[in-house]
């Protein structure tokens, strides 16, 4: 009977132990597959790549004993070298110490050499392969998964496969790729990273400019260089056109067609010179629409800062003749183009908006236009043309690019004054002085003008200060009876109080007192100092990945300062030797207190080195830089891996199991002592006899009663002997 109880207790304890351990596994979040690690050798061969001419060249390999990644110098290392003429040479390597083995081989033929290396150390072994390319030959470059389509903001990939004239895949090459916008300007030029088997890749974030992109990839192998410009992909806005246009009061939908008169027309596909866009807006998040038919309607970009979140908004841009029922533009001005912008958006849904347009220098020269006078005008509710604040924002060899802030969308005219009517010879602007502006501090603008005439003249000076879509300051000041051949400083009574740091575009215009004559326009940029504080966070989503599997990066950029400016953001991944295996960069502009999250998937090559990898996200503006770092581990395929956090949790579980075992042993010992005493107590008389089959809990735990069983016996304090650890567990000392 006693042995049966012992067996029962043993089974109960074992079951409790297994249940506790199973719960510990469950706490780890997964049930690991426990694998007994087998010893093997891991070989890392130094790439040879391209050799310009036949010559002697060292072959080097580093041997690690696994698991543990311990460098070993006791291995026997050999190689079978397959030559271009299909013969094989077998060679033996020599140990150079620190796990490195070398052999100098005479590459005496032009072509591709394949080198298969084997290392043996006792019962452990490992292999590695590499290629050497000797002499002159052509590189055959192809694009894999060519012509995909991406949504703006998603991650795209350029992948190339490179072989030589022997049709052998080429590894260890130096390659670059250049991606071109739909207008053929450069989006990015980047270094390609190697995957395996002659494949190379570059990951990028699809830009906001929609349309068809082209890609040129170039590779160099020794004295050989070749390229392929057949890469293609497209970028869409990332939303599907609605089956029904969004309704609501004041909604206008134009689906294409139509001629002069500002839009309208029947349905169907858009006519030539008409461009449509369907997009979503998020309240407070700037939306940029990159336009493709600039040659027809002159517009390159529309930016909208929405006051509300709107789905499936639509916009139609169309080049038209002069809209019907609109007055003539003054004869002193020349019209470059009329254009209408129609949208389903109501005015209450748009907080701010701007239009950027392009005007060719050839047109300006042929029409004798003063370039400083280029302006966008809008046909207003008062049935008159009104000049909008227009700023020169860029220039290239063939064109100027201007930006105008628009109070609403509708009919526009792009105009310029002829040089005879833009009378710089009579008066001009000498300088603009903003008195060293600072955030939150009122400043008094001043514009210095010069009367180059022969009589006193009255002027009006208009000053506009713009940052992005924000018009920070507009004011007009009089300058009366300015003497001839004299400079006058016009001090504005209205003060400018800057609120956001960064680059501001300041434009001053000099008019006659009746505004009939424009004398001069001057534009300058002012960089307003402030707190540059772009913070960046990065998270490596997987703590470990096997070779050949991608690693996901979660990157957050935060503008915690008061700058609003383009910055450069980039991310790189470094292998255990601090070599860059992947990198990418893109410009980014965040408004103060705005943040942006980017998710990037980084391809890890099949032949990647094992160990700790570092991912860095970097924000750079001028001399300022912020960096965030996370790490992950690349492990062999199929190997079980526990992170340090998992290991700590496992150790805590083991300690808890040991504590439970000790407590169980204590209770068993107490139980064994309590049963005989309970039986012995039944034979004696006591004041309170115990019920049959029952015993007190304190007896079960082995605690002695202090009260004497004899009646009227005096209470005495007894000195107890010190108890050791074995006594605590219930064993005799």
Image (spheres, rainbow, N blue to C red):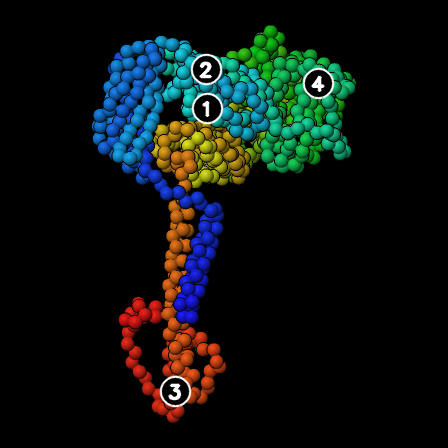
Q: Mark 1 sits on what residue?
A: 201
* Separation of residues labelled 1 and 3 (CA atoms): 89 Å
Pointer 4 local density, CA inside 10 Å: few below 14, some 14–19, many at least 20: some
x and y percentages locating residue 174 in the rendered image:
39, 19
Pointer 2 local density, CA inside 10 Å: few below 14, some 14–19, many at least 20: many
**Which one is closest to the eye, mark 1 or mark 3?**
3
On the question of residue 29 being in view, the answer is yes
Which secondary structure lies at badge 4?
A: loop
**Which one is closest to the eye, mark 3 or mark 4?**
3
Q: Mark 4 sits on what residue?
A: 270
* Separation of residues labelled 4 and 1 (CA atoms): 37 Å
Judge left or right: residue 91 versus residue 711.
Answer: left
Q: Mark 2 sits on what residue?
A: 141
Mark 2 and mark 4 residues within 8 Å of each other at the beta carbon = no
Which secondary structure lies at badge 1?
A: strand
* Separation of residues labelled 3 and 4 (CA atoms): 108 Å
Precedes in sequence: disc 3 or disc 4 = 4
Residue located at (32% from left, 30% from top): 126
Residue located at (74% from left, 19% from top): 268
Given residues 655 and 381, the one toward you in this image is 655
* Separation of residues labelled 2 and 4 (CA atoms): 38 Å
Q: Mark 3 sits on what residue?
A: 709
Which secondary structure lies at badge 2?
A: strand
Given residues 315 and 602, the one toward you in this image is 602
């Amino acid at each position: 009977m006693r042995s049966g109880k012992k067996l029962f207790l043993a089974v109960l304890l074992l079951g409790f132990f297994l249940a506790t351990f199973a719960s510990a596994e469950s706490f780890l979040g997964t049930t690991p597959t426990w694998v007994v690690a087998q010893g093997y050798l891991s070989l890392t061969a130094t790439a040879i790549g391209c050799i310009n001419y036949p010559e002697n060249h060292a072959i080097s390999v580093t041997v690690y004993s696994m698991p543990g990644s311990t460098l070993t110098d006791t291995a026997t290392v050999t190689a079978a070298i397959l030559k271009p003429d299909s013969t094989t040479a077998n060679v033996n390597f020599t140990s150079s110490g620190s796990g490195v083995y070398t052999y100098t081989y005479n590459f005496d033929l032009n072509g591709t050499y394949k080198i298969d290396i084997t290392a043996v150390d006792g019962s452990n072994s490992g292999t590695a392969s590499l290629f050497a390319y000797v002499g002159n030959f052509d590189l055959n470059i192809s694009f894999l998964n060519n012509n995909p389509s991406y949504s703006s903001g998603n991650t795209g990939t350029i992948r190339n496969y490179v072989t030589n004239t022997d049709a052998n895949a080429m590894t260890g090459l130096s390659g670059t790729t250049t991606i071109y916008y739909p207008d053929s300007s450069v989006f990015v030029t980047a270094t390609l990273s190697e995957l395996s088997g002659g494949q190379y890749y570059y990951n990028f974030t699809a830009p906001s400019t929609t349309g068809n992109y082209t890609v040129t990839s170039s590779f160099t192998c020794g004295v050989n260089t070749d390229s392929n410009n057949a890469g293609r992909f497209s970028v869409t806005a990332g939303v599907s056109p609605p089956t029904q246009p969004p309704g609501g009061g004041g909604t206008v939908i134009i689906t294409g067609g139509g001629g002069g008169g500002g839009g309208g027309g029947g349905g169907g596909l858009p006519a030539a010179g008409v461009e449509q866009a369907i997009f979503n807006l998020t309240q407070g998040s700037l939306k940029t629409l990159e336009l493709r038919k600039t040659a027809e309607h002159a517009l390159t970009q529309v930016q909208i800062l929405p006051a509300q979140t709107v789905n499936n908004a639509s916009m139609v841009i169309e080049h038209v003749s002069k809209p019907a029922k609109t007055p003539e533009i003054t004869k002193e001005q020349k019209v470059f183009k009329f254009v209408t912008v129609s949208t389903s958006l109501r005015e209450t849904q748009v907080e701010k908006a701007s239009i950027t347009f392009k005007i060719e220098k050839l047109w300006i020269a042929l029409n004798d236009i003063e370039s400083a006078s280029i302006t966008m005008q809008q046909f207003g509710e008062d049935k008159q043309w009104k000049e909008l604040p227009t700023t020169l924002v860029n220039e290239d060899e063939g064109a100027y690019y201007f930006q105008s802030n628009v109070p609403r969308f509708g009919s526009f005219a792009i105009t310029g004054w002829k040089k005879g009517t833009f009378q710089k010879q009579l008066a001009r602007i000498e300088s603009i002085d903003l008195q060293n502006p600072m955030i939150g501090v009122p400043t008094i603008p001043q514009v210095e003008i010069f009367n180059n005439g022969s009589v006193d003249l009255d002027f009006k000076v208009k000053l506009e200060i713009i940052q992005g879509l924000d018009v920070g300051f507009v004011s007009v000041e009089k300058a009366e009876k300015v003497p001839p051949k004299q400079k006058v400083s016009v001090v504005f009574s209205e003060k400018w109080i800057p609120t956001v740091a960064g680059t501001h575009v300041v434009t001053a215009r000099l008019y006659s007192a009746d505004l009939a004559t424009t004398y001069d326009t001057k534009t300058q940029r002012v960089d307003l100092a402030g707190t540059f504080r772009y913070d960046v966070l990065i998270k490596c989503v997987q703590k470990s990945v096997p070779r050949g599997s991608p690693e996901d990066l979660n990157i957050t950029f935060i503008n915690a300062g008061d700058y609003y400016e383009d910055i450069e953001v980039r991310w790189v991944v470094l292998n255990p030797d601090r070599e860059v295996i992947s990198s990418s960069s893109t410009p980014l502009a965040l408004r103060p207190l705005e943040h942006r999250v980017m998710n990037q998937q980084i391809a890890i090559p099949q032949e990647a080195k094992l160990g700790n990898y570092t991912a860095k996200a970097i924000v750079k503006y001028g001399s300022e830089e912020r960096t965030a770092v996370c790490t992950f581990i690349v492990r062999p395929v199929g190997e079980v891996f526990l992170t340090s956090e998992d290991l700590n949790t496992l150790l805590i579980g083991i300690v808890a199991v040991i504590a439970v075992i000790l407590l169980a042993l204590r209770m068993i010992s107490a139980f064994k002592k309590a049963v005989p005493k309970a039986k012995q107590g039944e034979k004696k008389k006591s004041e309170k006899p115990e019920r049959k089959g029952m015993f007190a809990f304190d007896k079960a735990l082995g605690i002695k009663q202090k009260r004497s069983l004899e009646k009227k016996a005096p209470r005495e304090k007894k000195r107890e002997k010190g108890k050791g650890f074995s006594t605590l567990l219930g064993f005799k000392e």
